[in-house]
């Protein structure tokens, strides 16, 4: 199982230690009850105090041991669980990296976040709230049965039957209902995260289209479903807990009846009757934890299925990736050619682009135009290897892109996107992301080349100034220029720019476009833009309409 025991590799010794500590803590609780019962009964006979000293010390030792051992068990078990969850999240992120970005549309962003956070946390509950209490209950329950059986076989048999009913039979009988309720809880949680994410992203458009109230009503329905599923799960847990108390009560009743008879016949010392009667009560908490573990097991199973989908999809994607190397670079730069290329996004029922013929030669400036949804951004995704083609052929210097490692393929391209993401760090480090090995002087030259020299000089700490969360401290024009600086620092032979001047004023847009197109004789530039004036700055103009190239290019 990809989310179960294999995760324990390298941590089994710690996990065994956590189980032992948990079992000892529960055993201390049972021993505390048994010894206290004997002490009270024996003390009622007024023996010399020295006769009671061992029991008094035992009560103190077991009372202190229960708390200390439980604390140590929590430290060890949670340390192991956090290590395992970190390992699992690393595997998930690695799988997503293999999928990204073509496979990510298989899941909505909110759903994917739910799998990465909430579902992984639930898998941690498999170790903390399933295996640990079940292992502890098995050890302590068996020890308690042996204890009572050694004092009075009938009481031992009664306790064994009660434990089997409360910890085995009831969870098995309630398994189907519990599984259904917990799957519903996990599903509703995922749907809620997905809907909330979409609602936050599309609030403005929803209000303009008059669909905001409908989305809120849909979210309210999902919340009601989640509450209903949680109530169903709570009812099952409550029923199991109630039956556990009743079962232990039955064991107490058996001990009272059998123990009283044994005392009457002289087969049992009177002071041991209290031990027989009170010991089953000490197991109530342990048995109730097993009932809770049954519900947690079903929840973690549902969460594990969702996490496994991502892991298996990533493993399948990684297995299919080509491993070939790029051909040796030509002296004047590579030539990229697309011949009859078609591509579609995952889950779509038709191609987003088709019949695309394009050649990008060193030093060329190509403009791609078209209405929104015509396939311009899809063409960029195809070139970057983010979207696999469904027909046609894409080559570099005659070598098929399908045979080249995608990571190596992407080293051909610099990318200037429409909404460049800025991290909460300095201007310098945000640009250095394009080439982490670049020195400060190289980054500064890229900033100067993007026309940011004056702006940098006016900042409080120069290029070391922090840009704030999501780049809150910079304007839209400065953000785009930083994206241009990244592209210049990357210094790749082909530069792809997807609407880099959107939402910028005319003067800033002209300046940004001029910097992007001034790439020298070895760099090809493909610019996606709605601005008609950009057509005068390039060598060729391509127009897309419903995913296909249109000739001649429309004017006006």
Image: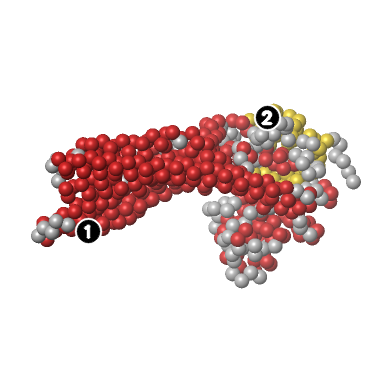
Name the residue beneath numbered marker 1: 60
Asked if residue 364 can be seen in this view, the reply is no
Task: Measure the C-alpha gap from mark 1 to mark 2.
Answer: 74 Å
Q: What residue appears at the point 42 percent right and 49 percent down from the top-left corner? A: 82
Residue pictured at 48% horizontal, 38% vertical: 178
Residue 203 is situated, as x and y percent measured from the top left of the image, at 71, 53
Q: Is residue 354 above or below residue 240?
A: above
Residue occupying the point 16% across, 48% down: 270
Residue extending furthest toward the top: 391
Q: Nearer the viewer, residue 415 or 353?
A: 353
Residue 543 visible at all: yes
Residue in the picture at 52% in, 40% down: 181
Placement of 392 over or under 92, stated as above or below: above
Number of other residues with Cα within 10 Å of mark 1, as a class: few under 14, some 14 to 19, many 20 or more = few
**Of 281 and 342, the residue lying toward us:** 281
Q: Position of residue 323 (x, y in %)?
A: 54, 33
Q: Secondary structure at mark 1?
A: helix
Image coloring type: secondary structure
Estimate the x, y position of residue 343 in percent, counting from the top left: 70, 33
Q: Is 150 left or right of 27, judged from the image as shown?
A: left
Q: Nearer the viewer, mark 1 or mark 2?
A: 1
Of labels 1 and 2, earlier in sequence is 1
Q: Quadrant of residue 41?
A: bottom left
Identify the residue position indicated by label 2 in the image.
390
How many other residues sit within 10 Å of disc 2, few (<14), some (14-19) or many (≥20)?
few
Disc 2, SS = strand
Q: Are marks 1 and 2 in contact (CB under 8 Å)?
A: no
Foreground of the two, 454 or 156: 156
């Amino acid at each position: 199982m990809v989310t179960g025991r294999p995760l324990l590799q390298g941590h089994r010794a710690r996990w065994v230690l956590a189980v032992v500590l948990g079992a000892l803590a529960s055993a201390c609780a049972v021993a505390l009850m048994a010894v206290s019962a004997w002490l009270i009964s024996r003390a009622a006979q007024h023996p010399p105090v020295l006769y009671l000293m061992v029991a008094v010390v035992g009560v103190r030792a077991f009372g202190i041991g229960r708390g200390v051992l439980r604390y140590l068990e929590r430290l060890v078990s949670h340390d192991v669980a956090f290590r395992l969850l970190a390992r699992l999240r690393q595997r998930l992120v690695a799988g997503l990296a293999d999928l990204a970005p073509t496979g990510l549309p298989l899941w909505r962003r909110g759903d994917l976040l739910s799998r990465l956070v909430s579902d992984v946390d639930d898998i941690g509950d498999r170790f903390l709230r399933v295996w640990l209490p079940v292992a502890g209950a098995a050890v302590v329950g068996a020890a308690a049965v042996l204890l009572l059986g050694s004092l009075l076989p009938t009481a031992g048999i009664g306790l064994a039957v009660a434990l089997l009913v409360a910890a085995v039979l009831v969870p098995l009988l309630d398994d189907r209902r519990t599984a259904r309720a917990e799957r519903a809880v996990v599903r509703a949680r995922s749907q809620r995260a997905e809907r909330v994410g979409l609602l936050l992203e599309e609030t403005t458009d929803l209000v303009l289209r008059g669909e905001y109230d409908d989305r809120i009503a849909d979210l309210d329905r999902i919340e009601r479903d989640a509450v209903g599923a949680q109530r169903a799960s709570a009812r099952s847990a409550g029923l199991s807990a109630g039956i556990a108390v009743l079962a232990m009560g039955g064991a107490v009743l058996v001990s009272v009846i059998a123990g009283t008879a044994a005392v009457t016949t002289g087969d049992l010392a009177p002071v041991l009757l209290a031990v027989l009667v009170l010991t089953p009560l000490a197991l109530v908490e342990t048995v109730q934890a097993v009932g809770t573990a049954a519900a947690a097991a079903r929840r973690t199973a549902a969460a594990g299925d969702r996490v496994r989908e991502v892991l298996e999809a990533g493993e399948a994607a990684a297995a299919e990736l080509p491993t070939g190397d790029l051909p040796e670079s030509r002296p004047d730069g590579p030539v990229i050619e697309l011949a009859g290329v078609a591509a579609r996004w995952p889950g779509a029922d038709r191609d987003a682009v088709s019949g695309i013929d394009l050649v990008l030669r060193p030093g060329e400036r190509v403009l791609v135009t078209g209405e929104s949804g015509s396939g311009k951004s899809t063409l960029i995704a195809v070139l970057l290897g983010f979207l696999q083609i469904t027909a046609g052929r894409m080559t570099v210097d005659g070598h098929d892109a399908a045979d080249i490692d995608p990571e190596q393929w992407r080293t051909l391209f610099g990318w200037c996107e429409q909404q460049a993401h800025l991290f909460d760090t300095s201007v310098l480090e945000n640009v250095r992301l394009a080439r982490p090995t670049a020195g400060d002087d190289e980054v500064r030259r890229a900033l100067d080349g993007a026309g940011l020299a004056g702006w940098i000089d006016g900042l409080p700490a120069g290029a070391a100034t922090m840009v704030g969360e999501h780049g809150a401290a910079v304007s839209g024009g400065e953000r785009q220029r930083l994206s241009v600086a990244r592209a210049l620092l990357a210094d790749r032979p082909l530069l792809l720019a997807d609407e880099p001047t959107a939402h910028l004023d005319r003067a800033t847009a002209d300046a940004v476009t001029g910097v992007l197109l001034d790439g020298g004789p070895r760099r090809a530039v493909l610019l996606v833009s709605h601005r008609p004036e950009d057509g005068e700055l390039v060598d060729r103009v391509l127009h897309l309409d419903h995913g296909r190239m249109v000739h001649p290019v429309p004017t006006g």
